[in-house]
């Protein structure tokens, strides 16, 4: 996304005006009274704010013109809803609204299409989360969200997961200075037991060559389908240790199976 070009949506970014806070305070009553000229001046004077926010969304391959237009919609919504009695600067109020408008656009135009009903449920869940967080002074549980929305818990989980940006299974999420832990290490295998790869190859002899702890870790991970965090909690060691032991055990078994089959 080329944000350094001179023209976006027909607007010469090098000639955009700069508006002062004092001038904005003068324009607010005129804008809210329906003065179109004052409204245009106010919006034009804040287009640089939209441009600065677009830089946060670089590298996504999105068209800069499209994002700029969406950001302007967020700017106009902020202007229409801003309360001068709040005692805060307009930019403080407008920035999160512009960002929110752009994020909604990106979610709605994601390559993985999400139905309107799912998006509506997800947005309601986020509103309920904000409301309950304020009331409870903590992050609400999914069950509490479902109760607040009066919908099944499964619907809330499915809707919130549906609007998340896709990530790679090989995305590192933790590193203690040794082996990195990846998202794939947190994935629980929900497949039927007879589908697990450990049951589809002759590894009985290889398993006997492992230590008791290594066998227990592999059994919990691949037969019971538990995450590394769950295994760590039951055994009483860190997740990083579980990861290293698991990788070492699999490497030893692989060598043994390859040697046996050759």
Image (cartoon, helix red, strand yellow):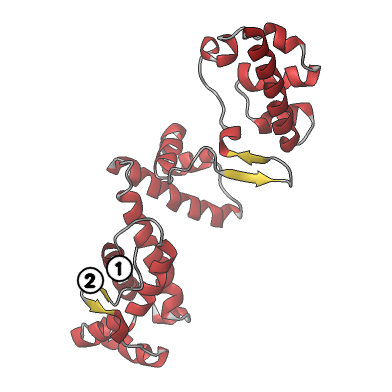
Image-based side of 224 in relation to 53, left or right: right
Mark found first going from the N terminus, 2 or 1: 2
Image-based side of 203 in relation to 149, left or right: right
Eyeballing the image, is 59 above or below 119? below
Assign a secondary structure to mark 2. Answer: loop
Occupied quadrant, residue 84: bottom left
Q: Position of residue 24 (x, y in %)?
A: 36, 88
Q: Which residue is mark 1?
A: 68
- In percent of the image, x 34 and y 54: which residue is there? 106
Eyeballing the image, is 201 above or below 228? above
Assign a secondary structure to mark 1. Answer: helix
- In percent of the image, x 28 and y 43: which residue is there? 116
Mark number displayed over residue 231: none
Occupied quadrant, residue 222: top right
Mark number displayed over residue 9: 2
Q: Residues within 10 Å of mark 1 (few under 14, many from 20)?
A: many
Separation of disc 2 and disc 1 at Cα? 8 Å
Residue projecting furthest to the front: 262
Q: Nearer the viewer, residue 216 or 247?
A: 247
Occupied quadrant, residue 121: top left
Q: Position of residue 129 (x, y in %)?
A: 49, 50
Q: Nearer the viewer, residue 238 or 33?
A: 238
Eyeballing the image, is 48 above or below 204? below
Q: Is residue 16 visible?
A: no
Number of numbered discs visible in the structure rendering: 2
- Contact flag, marks 2 and 1 (Cβ < 8 Å): yes
Q: Is residue 194 visible?
A: yes
Q: Nearer the viewer, residue 187 or 129?
A: 187
């Amino acid at each position: 996304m080329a944000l350094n070009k001179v023209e976006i949506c027909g607007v010469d970014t090098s000639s955009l005006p700069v508006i002062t806070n004092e001038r904005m305070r003068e324009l607010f009553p005129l804008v809210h009274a329906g003065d179109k000229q004052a409204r245009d001046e106010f919006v034009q004077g804040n287009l640089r704010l939209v441009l600065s926010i677009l830089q946060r969304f670089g590298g996504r391959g999105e068209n800069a013109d499209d994002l700029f237009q969406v950001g302007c919609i967020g700017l106009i919504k902020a202007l229409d809803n801003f309360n001068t009695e709040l005692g805060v600067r307009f930019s403080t109020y407008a920035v999160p609204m512009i960002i929110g408008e752009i994020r909604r656009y990106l979610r709605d135009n994601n390559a993985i299409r999400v139905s309107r009903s799912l998006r509506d449920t997800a947005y309601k869940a986020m509103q309920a989360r904000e409301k309950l967080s304020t009331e409870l002074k903590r992050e609400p549980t999914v069950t509490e969200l479902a109760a607040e929305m009066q919908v099944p818990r499964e619907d809330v989980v499915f809707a919130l997961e549906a609007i998340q940006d896709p990530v790679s299974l090989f995305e590192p999420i933790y590193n203690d200075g040794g082996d990195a832990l990846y998202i794939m290490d947190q994935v629980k295998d929900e497949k039927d037991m007879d589908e697990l790869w450990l049951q589809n190859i002759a590894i009985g002899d290889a398993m006997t060559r492992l230590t008791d702890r290594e066998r227990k870790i592999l059994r919990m991970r691949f037969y019971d389908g538990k995450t590394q965090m769950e295994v760590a909690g039951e055994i009483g060691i860190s997740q990083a240790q579980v990861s290293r032991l698991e990788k070492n055990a699999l490497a030893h078994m692989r060598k043994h199976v390859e040697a046996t089959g050759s």
